[in-house]
Amino acid sequence: MINARMKPRDENKARDILAATLVEVEALGLAGLSIAAVARRANVATGTVYIYFESKEALIDALYLATKKEMAETIFRAGEPGPVEELPVRVAFERMCLAYLEYLVENGAAVVFMGQVKNSPYLSETSKRETSTVTKALTDLLARGRRERLLKDLDDELVLAFLQGTLREMATLAAREPRANRKKRLRQIAALCWDALKA
Amino acid sequence: MINARMKPRDENKARDILAATLVEVEALGLAGLSIAAVARRANVATGTVYIYFESKEALIDALYLATKKEMAETIFRAGEPGPVEELPVRVAFERMCLAYLEYLVENGAAVVFMGQVKNSPYLSETSKRETSTVTKALTDLLARGRRERLLKDLDDELVLAFLQGTLREMATLAAREPRANRKKRLRQIAALCWDALKA
Amino acid sequence: MINARMKPRDENKARDILAATLVEVEALGLAGLSIAAVARRANVATGTVYIYFESKEALIDALYLATKKEMAETIFRAGEPGPVEELPVRVAFERMCLAYLEYLVENGAAVVFMGQVKNSPYLSETSKRETSTVTKALTDLLARGRRERLLKDLDDELVLAFLQGTLREMATLAAREPRANRKKRLRQIAALCWDALKA
Amino acid sequence: MINARMKPRDENKARDILAATLVEVEALGLAGLSIAAVARRANVATGTVYIYFESKEALIDALYLATKKEMAETIFRAGEPGPVEELPVRVAFERMCLAYLEYLVENGAAVVFMGQVKNSPYLSETSKRETSTVTKALTDLLARGRRERLLKDLDDELVLAFLQGTLREMATLAAREPRANRKKRLRQIAALCWDALKA
DNA sequence: GATGAATGAGATTTCATTCAT
DNA sequence: GATGAATGAAATCTCATTCAT
């Protein structure tokens, strides 16, 4: 028996719409985003978008949360297999940096989207606050690094902002590079970050 | 005697409109920008905006170029008084970082604007390409640093992206800090950058 | 089954909008034409006009072509039933004149519209050139008339311009006449034209 | 002593503005007419137009009356030197037709303007009614022609409309013709008109 | 649920007219 | 009188959202 008010069942369609939104924002920016274009790219009718998302704002909000979560999980999974806590700090740090960089390079659209969405009138206050609990893996590592006198004694907030800014910008650069050089380039970047933060 | 072919009689008005645009974009993002709101904030009639700028696109383009130029000049002036070429590399580097950071902290709106405008449908290709010639002061310094074996042997492009991303992100952080701590915090950041790049 | 790529579902609506445009232009001229007024008269929302016609220019262009086609077909059908080629030249000529005159009298709005639209900034060059192939019926008749030494030896272009100008102007006059006199008046006009052109 | 409320003294400027209006309407139609463009073409400032004409409507109205008057005078002067009344009807008729045709050929812009202005929202009712008293020369001639049994017994109104429509349309045609052929072509047209109207 | 035509509020842009210089 | 920047009402056009099918 299916409840008439149940959530729409076709979860693929919601995914298609979110993906289409990402591509559109990458191409034209948030200011150039129209629901009609999203629907066209997702191969659904305009009205269908409103079955899965209450409004344009809700759509953007949902994409924001989804992207944020995916980013965090990417870093988180960088420790696996095998618990991060047992690796030497430097190795774990480099793994995480590389995982995040690779994610950013492969997902340029996500980078653009997150950049656009901040300071836009669309993002709800709730979503802005929503801090991923998954960054915990990283802050734990930083704490350990400080304890072991390997890292400078800096606020988490500062370090996170540093990594955020650096990696995002440099991933954009690396994405333009030929595939062959890329691995080397990413390692270079990770080394840069370590040098910046090491005691 | 004013040239009959020049439209703007009052250069202040163009400035007012550009300034109003910056404030509006900071508040509502590029997607929330309306010419009516800009005009209201600049204390002119809607139509007046079109006397100074051909279209919304042209307005944004002009603001982009103006902001880019101002940013570059800020770094450039950091060497003065006294030619940068005679300072030790490390001192000159720190001066430039601090000058840029201070500019970014004081001009959060500009940071937001530049972030929004990239990947927007408004920016003309010409403006995107327009590279400030003023970054030369910085690249000269980097070259000197490499020659003196003080800096890592990295592409200018990579280093510029690194500084760009790091400083922008961290300036945003610093802007939220109480005025008292700020100076110290900015120095911390500049040190971070040096450590990242030093040989 | 309707092609997914075709926009107008309701062909009547396109017709309504075209008709409303004609009425508006008759009343206020092309210079007084506003899309809002057209929409109001056609009983649709302003936005709906843009579903059926890309722009104001496209709407006017479409109306121009439709009107031109209708005019040509009116003359063309004057020969039916029974092929024009078998009628005496004079009879066929008079039939065509009368048919065209009657059309013009009944469709004063079309006359006004065509007069306004020429030399307007709205008409595309393509549409201006688009010459109805249907005038062939008339030029065939003129050729036969010349062969039979019934008509003066004049360029088709000159004769067509003569009929065009004369009939349009006089139809406007006839339209103001009481219905009772009209038939007689139209015959008078057709006779005038024959006298002008006969050898 | 000059009255402060006197009419503007520079009559040339008024003429320039009227002439500029004519050219603009010929190029873009009445719907494409803007005061700014008129001013630009007349080499005056926008505001200056309003010194000589109360409003856009008044400007168009004035141009309408001026053009109408000029047209009538052209026909009128065709009889001179020497009173039309003493010439044979046919000769006088041809002279008038040719004079009018030549005027129309030389003044294509006036033809376009008059066509556009009819059925426009700009023309005042007063101006529409204003019938030139100068057409009297022509109607006198027509009356004489009828008395002498040279012309068909038709209403003046009908004949005037006939000539109006025919000559205007054919002048447009003749204007496109090389100068050399033109004289011959105009005679052809005048002959056509005579044949149409002769008894 | 899915569709896409229809809606109309609101955005951009134009332009007749005014007014300070 | 002459100028052209400034005005703001009104036009064109867009697009988030709704709704009949």
Image (cartoon, coloured by chain):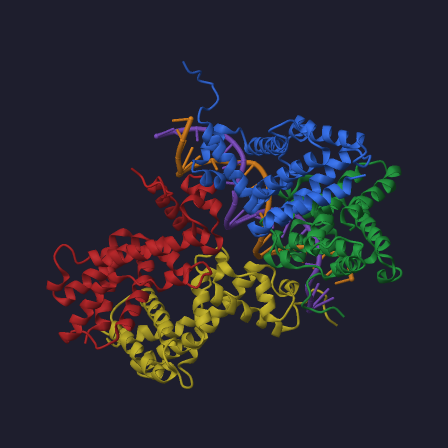
Chain colours: A yellow, B red, C green, D blue, E purple, F orange
Residue C8 visible in rendering: yes
Residue that appears at 28% across and 68% down = B160
B58 or A130: nearer the viewer = B58
Of all residues shown, which one is farthest toward the top?
D1
Q: Position of residue A106 (x, y in %)?
A: 44, 77
Residue that appears at 63% across and 62% down = A50
Query: Relative to C171, does residue C156 appear above or below in the rendering?
Result: below
From the viewer's perspective, is A92 left or right of D105? left
From the viewer's perspective, is B177 left or right of A31? left
The quadrant holding residue D158 is top right
The quadrant holding residue C23 is top right
Image quadrant for the C terminus of chain D? top right
Q: Position of residue B128 (x, y in %)?
A: 37, 63
A171 or A59: nearer the viewer = A171
Q: Position of residue C137 (x, y in %)?
A: 78, 60
The quadrant holding residue C178 is top right
Residue C120 visible in rendering: no
C127 or A191: nearer the viewer = C127
Image quadrant for the N terminus of chain D? top left
Q: How many marks?
A: 0
Query: Relative to F18, does residue A79 appear above or below in the rendering?
Result: below
Q: Position of residue D166 (x, y in %)?
A: 70, 44
D105 or D21: nearer the viewer = D105
